[in-house]
Structures are given as C-alpha cells and as structure tokens.
Image: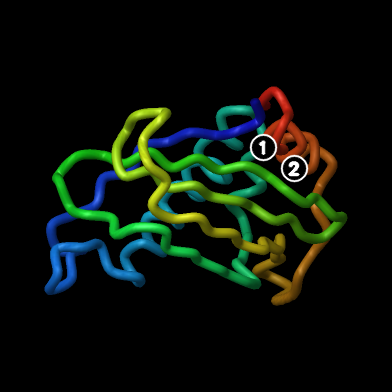
Amino acid sequence: MGVFVTGVRPRWSDMDAFGHVNHANTVTLLEEARIDLLFTEAARHGVPEMAEGMVVARLAVDYLAPLAFTGDEVRVEVSVRELKSASFTLDYAVRGDRREDGAVVTRAETLMVPYNLAAGRPRRLLEAERDFLAGWRAGGNGA
C-alpha cells in the first residue's frame, strides 16, 4: 500500500502527570519512526545517502486521543504524500497499540528537506532517493 509500518515503544519517562505521552515525547516517537524509514530502510534498499543530511522544515501534529503509556509498542504508519525535487512531505498515523485496526491517536506531517552538511545548505534529492521515496507514496506498493 505504500505505507511503511514500524513499532515504537514509548518509555515510562515519556508520561506527563496525567499518564499520557506528552507532546515533546510524541514528536520523538515520530522521529524514531522517521529514522527507521529514512535511514535504516533506505540503507537496506541501497540508499545510504538519506542518512547523510535530512532536516525537518515543518512539523504539524494533531492529537485525536491521548496516547497512554502501557509499556507496549505502538504502531506508526508513515507514507510519502508529496515528493518534489528538493523536499517531500511525510504523513504519520500513530495507533494506540500494535494492531493494524487499532485506534489512531495522533496524525502528523513533516516537510523534509535534504541537506548538505558540508556546504551548510539544502540540496536536491538524488535520483535514488526519489525512487526510494516514490515507493512509499500513499497508494504505492512500497520500495
């Protein structure tokens, strides 16, 4: 389906006073899922350049229900919505547990920009990076 699925385990220290995973730690869970896709999965598919410089230019998070700490992994689904020559948008759905049909508790999006660390400026996506990302477009078939 073009959706990358990974499990992320919230930590006990991620809870706020109400027993919910707080905003900053939810953003960290999104980051962990993004790293699984852009660094680990990309390298597995022969695209290690993704890990050499990628920055979040924009982040939006919508909370649909509290994410309660249970000690178990939660399911994070990531897909590419928009793919341009020098940026792409990732969509996230965080489910309250590992089940495919579990309740979505958070939706988010990040605008990602490839970045040349040595030059200190954004860069264009490489062809191999575009091909990898295209496989994870919503409605695609994965890389």
Q: Residues within 10 Å of mark 2 (few under 14, many from 20)?
A: some
The quarter of the image holding the N terminus is top right
Q: Is residue 13 left or right of residue 89?
A: left
Residue 6 location, quadrant: top left
- Nearest the camera: 20 or 58? 20
* Chain-order first, disc 2 or disc 1: 1
Q: Residue at x 38, y 52 (%)?
A: 105
Percent across and percent down for residue 113 are 71, 63
Q: Residue at x 50, y 55 (%)?
A: 107
Q: Residue at label 2?
A: 129
The quarter of the image holding the C terminus is top right
Percent across and percent down for residue 61 are 50, 66
- Nearest the camera: 40 or 13? 13
Q: Is residue 128 left or right of residue 36?
A: right
Q: Residue at x 14, y 44 (%)?
A: 71
Colour scheme of the rendered structure: rainbow
Percent across and percent down for residue 83 are 80, 50
Q: Residue at label 1?
A: 47
CB contact under 8 Å: marks 2 and 1: yes
Compared to residue 25, the image places residue 37 above or below, namely above
Report the amino acid beneath label 2.
Glu
